[in-house]
Amino acid sequence: MTDVAAFSFNKLVIFGVGLIGGSLARALRERGEADGACTVIGVGRSAASTGRAVELGVIDSSAALTDDAALREALAGADVVLLAAPVAQTQPLLERIAPFLGADTIVTDAGSTKSDVVAAARAALGARIGQFVPGHPIAGRESSGVEAALPDLYVGRNVVLCPLPENAPGTVERIAAMWRATGALVRDMAPEQHDRVFASVSHLPHVLSFALVEQILNSPDAALKFSFAAGGFRDFTRIAASSPEMWRDVCIANRVALLDELDAYSAVLARLRTAIEAADGAALEAVFARSRLARTEWQEQRAGGGAPGDASK
Amino acid sequence: MTDVAAFSFNKLVIFGVGLIGGSLARALRERGEADGACTVIGVGRSAASTGRAVELGVIDSSAALTDDAALREALAGADVVLLAAPVAQTQPLLERIAPFLGADTIVTDAGSTKSDVVAAARAALGARIGQFVPGHPIAGRESSGVEAALPDLYVGRNVVLCPLPENAPGTVERIAAMWRATGALVRDMAPEQHDRVFASVSHLPHVLSFALVEQILNSPDAALKFSFAAGGFRDFTRIAASSPEMWRDVCIANRVALLDELDAYSAVLARLRTAIEAADGAALEAVFARSRLARTEWQEQRAGGGAPGDASK
């Protein structure tokens, strides 16, 4: 765990102290309490929204986003600022922070999409864009809120960083070290690549799952169908219990990549439809067997290094 | 458990002693050993295929489907015959059995589709169709084979019966009593209704899940995508690890209902695509919120009477 020793900080400011921000704070504080002093400040829409995080000891103190003086004090001399709010709030948040942002402070985020976040950051930070390192910790979203925050949420999880041309190498490395200190595996990707990958393995499955429940609801015998739904339906639609607001925002923020994946998926469905209609058993079995093999191999590789308790994302 | 006392038999013959047939045998034998003598005979393609079931004590004896004398003896005086083989084998199996079938023997099945099974039974049994009661126990298929057979597999599970106009009431009631004796909840449906319901809540989700893995496999960055797939992908695609042969057969056997569901689903997807492209957050959130509510209510109702360990079906 030499990585764990590689990150130290004096002041971390987290905008949005929920599961993601709170878990980072708890992971770093557990080290900090060993290392010596380090301060974690949470910023929320109101004092109330961060009060619980202080009560739980997840953060040292809190500031209200609307309070200029408190925000200035919170950001003064901060090493790192994490934005852990909905991606749609990235630009207004950065515009709000910019006036109080020190030249040595590094800002990063935890958004599920990256191309839109980069555009928002460029618009808000302008010439200071080099201080912003886009990031995405791939961690659970099943339960949410600071009560669900865990010091080991990121152990063995992937954290994607999307370094910008304007980022100094040391700037990116500092954020990478912060995440490695939580036990996460840091991986770099271009924002467009990130958005394509997560449109495929996360955003599209959520849309498909919501769509199945919607289809059943629209059918005349919905109640009967639900009454016979069993384990296959249960797992297929578990992610349809995810936050409508979050997924609405993700679908819109990542719509370019998501539409590409949706169209590619519809093409596969059309192929399967043709095979079903033609009762082409060989064509169906070929696709099903290929999928089963790939899914089984994925599970096996994951069981090796993966986190079985990994939640929906 | 007055239901449990309501069924007794002298001889049960099971064609295909795997998870489904084996679990019925184990459930009834546990009662039989209390009640007194009752014989369970397993029939397989060969003696070897049923030998393991005899070793495990799931059945009393076995017969090879190819052996006329053994088959005649097995079926002589049988109370009930269960077909627990792939649905595609229903007609050849019934044609093979018909010459040896006593007038008082009731035949039922465990197939995942019903309209095709009824057609096959009518073709094979002709005027004796009244002796056939179509059935479908909704039970796990995750693990398979007689080793996976459990005496309590059906406790609290639904078993659908699709009575035919030619069935005498007492004939249907006898099969219903058999399943109730295993702890199952017996529900009647018309074959077409059964096929529509399961096309929607089981067959379509399997196709959609196989299709997602197929789509990723077809993409240029498949390995990268799989490497970032997390919990949402895991649950959405768990059923893509199901048997390609079984699902090939189900898709073809139930293709009429499945194509209807697939088209209705594609229409929902097209609506969502339009909303995503137009960045219509209100439309997306409305669908997602409705789906989340329905999925959450379904889970809660199920937690009341349902089987949490329920497997893919």
Image (tube, coloured by chain):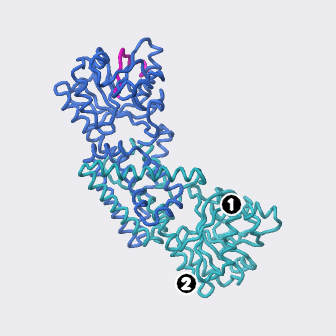
Chain colours: A cyan, B blue
Look at the image and give the residue range highlighted in magenta.
B2-15
10 Å crowding of disc 2: few (<14), some (14-19), many (20+)? some
Q: State the image coordinates of residue A303 (x, y, percent, origin top left).
A: 57, 50
Tell me: B244 left or right of A90. Answer: left
In which chain is the residue bearing label 2?
A
Return the residue found at the far bottom. A127
Q: Residue B200 appears at what percent x and percent y?
A: 34, 48
Residue nearest the viewer, comparing A15 with B142: B142
Amino acid type, callout 2: Ala
User: As drawn, is A54 to the left or to the right of B190?
Assistant: right
Q: Residues within 10 Å of mark 1 (few under 14, many from 20)?
A: many
Q: Which quarter of the image is occupied by the C terminus of chain B?
A: top left
Tell me if residue B259 comes above or below residue B95 in the rendering: below
Please give the label number shown on residue A59: none
Query: Which residue is tagged 2?
Result: A123
Residue furthest out toward the left: B127
Q: Is residue B12 magenta?
A: yes
The answer to whether one can see residue B6 in this image is no
Q: Which residue is mark 1?
A: A183
Where residue A276 appears, as percent x and y from the top left, is 27, 51
Q: Is residue A250 left or right of residue A25?
A: left
